[in-house]
Amino acid sequence: MGLAQCCLDRDIVHPGFIVLYSPLVTYHPPGRNSPVQLDHSLPAGIVADFYRDIQASFDGQMIVMKNLDPTEPFGPDAVDIPFTKELGVGR
């Protein structure tokens, strides 16, 4: 995300979008011996802070795949399209 934003800020050639695959699913809590949390019980605020930060600090398009659902609504400029296998829900 940082490299893409740097390119966008400096008008350096970049496709204008990035894809993040499971950025929160493999979250490690602080500490050398902390176990990987593979379930959905992240520390309070981590998920909300992640989505809040990417909305505030990236000017391009971002596709986030295989991740935890947002805990708060997106801002007015964001579009959330869930990809599901259910007819009539998302894509």
Image: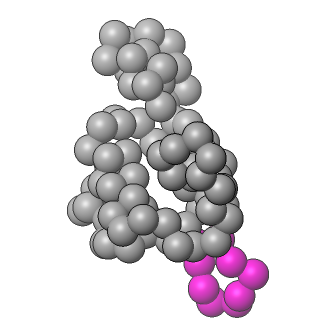
Determine which quarter of the picture holds residue 18: top right
Q: Position of residue 12 (x, y in %)?
A: 44, 10
Q: Is residue 24 magenta?
A: no
Q: Position of residue 48 (x, y in %)?
A: 35, 63
Question: Residue visible at 62% across and 47% down?
Answer: 33
Magenta residues, dominant SS class: loop
Q: Is residue 79 visible?
A: no
* Placement of 37 over or under 2, stated as above or below: below
Q: Residue furthest right?
A: 85
Q: Is residue 2 visible?
A: yes
In terms of depth relative to the viewer, which is nearer, 63 or 28? 28
Q: Is residue 26 left or right of residue 30?
A: right
| Residue numbers of the magenta segment | 82-90
Residue occupying the far bottom of the picture:
87
Say whether residue 76 is left or right of residue 6. Answer: left
Where on the picture, by quarter, is residue 24? bottom right
Residue 66 position in % (x across, y down)? 66, 61
Q: Residue furthest front?
A: 33
Which residue is found at the position 48% from the left and 46% from the top?
30
